[in-house]
Image (cartoon, helix red, strand yellow):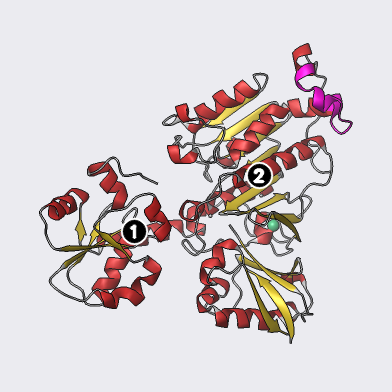
Amino acid sequence: MNQITVIVPAPLRQFTEGRDSVTLDAGTVAQALSELTSRYIELRRHLYSDDGKLRSFVNIYLNDEDIRYLEGKEDAGLAVGDEIRIVPSIAGGVATAVEVKEVEFSPEEMSRYARHLILPEVGPEGQKKLKQARVLLVGAGGLGSPASLYLAAAGVGTIGLVDFDVVESSNLQRQIVHGTRDVGRPKLESARDRLLDVNPGIEIEGHEVRLTSHNALDILSGYDIVVDGTDNFPTRYLINDACVLMGIPNVYGSIFRFEGQVSVFYAKQGPCYRCLYAEPPPPGLVPSCAEGGVLGVLPGIIGALQANETLKLILGAGDPLVGRLLLFDALRVRFRELKLRKDPACPICGENPTVKELIDYEVFCGIREAEAEGRRLEASVPVITAPELKARLDAGDPIRVIDVREPSELNISRLDEAELIPLKEFPASMARLVQSNEEIVVICRSGRRSAYAVRLLMDAGFSNASNLTGGLLAWSDEVDPTMAKY
Ligand code: ZN
């Protein structure tokens, strides 16, 4: 037995009482994980499937080495001071792919790119490569904002943008390509205006669609490099597979709260995203950014690193992040680098690929099933609408309103009448809600979590509980427009 440390990533800290590292005694990796999951029972089902196997969307590193590739794997022996790191998937001199043609620079361009032209690693040849390069950014949001601004400023000749969202005020905390006056405009239009203001000498190609298996190959064709700035698993796997099939590099970035990841997945020269995570986590198991929050500057740092990798790939300069996963911890200001290896059994870039064309990624990620289940759940409980609840409260009816959101969400919006019981404490707290004639109305942001809580109450024999349908979003739309939406 040796004293070792297990590093817990942000998405899983909710199961370790907020701890980011746990020190324990263990002789092998398997013992360490077993000790960890017996201390933190909830963590077990996130790390292991029902048949006791490590889940495929969770990777375990021993001192920066993926244990899948170590001798004896989970029986690998530990020494004092060893570090075990849990790395879950979080809903990024190579391709001198750009052929240099003769390009003349105008005096304005000579002056604009002067700081590049005097760099030996760029110079006029490099600047010509940049001008001829075609880069596609999927997502004009948190990661796409800094990445697109720097690529435009650097003189990347053609920038494609895929996005179909509209700018909302809650985006402005981190999506710096958009401004306050752009709220309500399509992100594509807003980003195009800003990027052409930064550099009128480039082309912006807008694709105002959701990237799907049907259009991905068409949209990606003709681009040299793809920058993944998405925030959901189906699109990540779609981008990965499309890039592998088309033989182009995928500059990957992801963010969660205070932590980010960056890599370059380029199957011709190294591993792809599926080599790292063969399968996505089931919906809801790893929270998405929208639920988890993110420090506004974090996508700025990660997106700028994606721009850095993209420029290096175009220039053929330096060592790209192929086969390396860079982790960034904003709170400690610490970078870690993990080695990635190509998985010979990878379903798309391995020796005997089973995925030979794009598939339905929503089905692959269980999204449709989870959505349908959510809708079934909401349909299975009694509901009350926002105007009805308002009228009943105004009339002084005895109603107990329970808010099942997280305490931090109350900082944005709340109903004065509501008492807070966060959903994860709900099963243990139900006893507090003595069955009486008093009616119970459960509320949350959108009506999904509260439906789950009403279901729990009904299963426990309560017959007087109903769900605020549409949640506080509906309250804001139908009762009180001053209530902030998020
Ligand atoms: Zn692969």
- Compared across the picture, whether 347 is left or right of 399 comes to right
The kind of residue on which mark 2 rests is Ile
Residue 448 numbered tag: 1
Quarter of the N terminus within the rendering: bottom right
Foreground residue among 369 and 83: 83
Callout 2: 10 Å neighbours few (<14), some, many (20+)? some
Residue 369: give x, y in percent of width and height.
41, 60
User: Which one is earlier in the sequence, the residue at label 2 or at label 1?
Assistant: 2
Residue 350 seen anywhere in this rendered image of the structure: yes
Q: Which residues are magenta?
A: 111-125
Q: Is residue 441 above or below residue 176?
A: below
Q: Residue at x 31, y 44 (%)?
A: 483
- Compared across the picture, whether 401 is left or right of 424 comes to left
Q: Is residue 445 magenta?
A: no
Residue 21: give x, y in percent of width and height.
64, 70
Foreground residue among 432 and 314: 432
Ligand 1: does it lie within 8 Å of the C-beta at label 1? no
Callout 1: 10 Å neighbours few (<14), some, many (20+)? many
The kind of residue on which mark 1 rests is Arg
Q: Residue at x 57, y 72 (%)?
A: 47
Name the residue carrying label 2: 301
* Circle 1 SS class: helix
Q: Residue at x 56, y 35 (%)?
A: 176
Residue 191 numbered tag: none
Residue 352: give x, y in percent of width and height.
71, 61
Q: Residue at x 72, y 77 (%)?
A: 4
- Please tell me in which quadrant of the rendered image residue 125 appears: top right
